[in-house]
């Protein structure tokens, strides 16, 4: 999982807890995303921040380039004109999922570096979900599409 510019430490904590629950092997924290140790992260992670491997990288797009060289397929979770509904996507593994800032989403530079962009169709009035909730849904769906 790649977290780009996630501003809420509580959301970062939720990402760690979700990663633990769903078997994510590593979290990359990029840009302004907060890093452990932080009480706010630990409060929500319930300790998962102590055992889920993580790494900080300044620029997500540079990380994506490096992961691509390691044969990872990198997919952004973002609604764009060209994004694919998550249920219609055929994932290839190993896969890294990029989630973005709570307000701005995944940056254009990062989207450009990704192989594909997928989105969760929204049926209500809101255009998006909380980033941690969206990440959990997407990881679960991707694992079931495997």
Image (cartoon, rainbow, N blue to C red):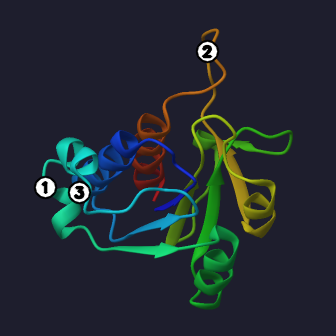
CA separation, marks 2 and 3? 28 Å
130 horizontally vs 84: left or right: left
Is there any visible trace of residue 41 in the rendered image? yes
Mark nearest the camera among 2 and 1 is 1
Horizontal and vertical percent for residue 95?
52, 69
Mark 1 or mark 3, earlier in chain: 3
128 horizontally vs 133: left or right: right
Q: Is residue 68 above or below residue 105?
A: below
Is there any visible trace of residue 94 in the rendered image? no
Q: Secondary structure at mark 2?
A: loop
The residue to which callout 2 is attached is 123
The residue to which callout 3 is attached is 20
Residue contact between numbered discs 2 and 1, judged by CB atoms under 8 Å? no
Q: Nearer the viewer, residue 128 or 32?
A: 32
Horizontal and vertical percent for residue 50?
17, 66
Q: Is residue 47 above or below residue 66?
A: above
Residue extending farthest top: 125
CA separation, marks 2 and 1? 34 Å
7 horizontally vs 18: left or right: right
Q: Is residue 123 above or below residue 118?
A: above
Mark nearest the camera among 2 and 3 is 3
The residue to which callout 1 is attached is 47
Mark 2 or mark 1, earlier in chain: 1
Instruction: Name the quadrant containing residue 137.
Output: top left
Mark nearest the camera among 1 and 3 is 1
For image coordinates 18% across by 43% down, the residue present is 43
Q: Nearer the viewer, residue 31 or 80?
A: 31
| Crowding at mark 2 (Cα within 10 Å: few <14, some 14-19, many 20+) | few
Horizontal and vertical percent for residue 146?
45, 59
Q: Nearer the viewer, residue 39 or 10?
A: 39
For image coordinates 64% across by 90% down, the residue present is 69
């Amino acid at each position: 999982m790649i977290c780009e510019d996630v501003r809420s430490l509580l959301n970062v904590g939720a990402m760690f807890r979700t990663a633990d629950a769903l078997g994510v092997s590593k979290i990359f924290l990029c840009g302004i995303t907060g890093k452990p140790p932080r009480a706010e992260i630990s409060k929500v992670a319930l300790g998962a921040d102590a055992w889920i491997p993580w790494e900080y990288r300044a620029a997500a797009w540079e990380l994506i380039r490096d992961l691509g060289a390691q044969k990872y397929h990198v997919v952004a979770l973002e609604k764009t004109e060209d994004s694919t509904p998550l249920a219609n996507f055929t994932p290839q593994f190993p896969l890294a999922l990029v989630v973005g800032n709570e307000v701005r989403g995944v940056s254009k530079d990062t989207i450009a570096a990704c192989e594909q962009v997928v989105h969760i169709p929204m049926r209500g009035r809101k255009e998006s979900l909380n980033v941690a909730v969206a990440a959990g849904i997407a990881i679960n769906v991707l694992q079931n599409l495997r």
